[in-house]
Image (spheres, rainbow, N blue to C red):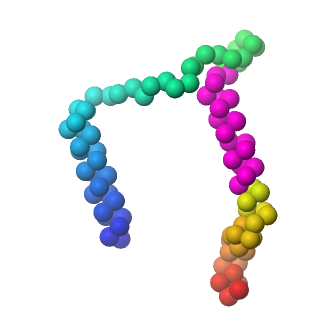
Amino acid sequence: LNLLVSAIGVSFLFMNVGLFWRGPTERDFPALIPADDLSPVAGIRLTGKDVMVVAVTLPTMALLTAFVRFTAVGKAMRATAQNPVAAQLM
């Protein structure tokens, strides 16, 4: 509980320092990827952000699935999820 209260206090500190330093006005985040439409089909919007999300998500999910299925840690996680008491006894 002490760590939670400390984390909340530090977050308030950071927020107030940010308000004091930059003020309460909104700031735009810079566009790192252009928002151009990449789709040749009219009516379908496909941007570089959409392609990047798919290109990052699919390999990450494949790696996570392989980790959970084929490693000893993944086997332990599945055993704990299925029966925590038996996994603790093992």
Note whether 66 is above or below 16 in the view shown: below
Note whether 22 is above or below 75 in the view shown: above
Residue at (79% x, 64% y) in the render = 70
Residue at (35% x, 27% y) in the render = 27
Residue at (57% x, 19% y) in the render = 35
Q: Is residue 43 visible?
A: yes
Q: Quadrant of residue 5?
A: bottom left
In the current view of this chain or complex, which residue is farthest to the bottom? 89
The percent coordinates of residue 9 (x first, y second) are 27, 57
Q: Is residue 82 visible?
A: no
The residue segment tinted magenta is: 46-64
Q: Is residue 10 left or right of residue 66?
A: left
Note whether 80 is above or below 62 in the view shown: below
Q: Where is the C terminus found, in terms of image quarters?
A: bottom right
Q: Quadrant of residue 85?
A: bottom right
Q: Quadrant of residue 53?
A: top right
- Pick the residue in front: 59 or 41: 59
The dominant secondary structure in magenta is: helix
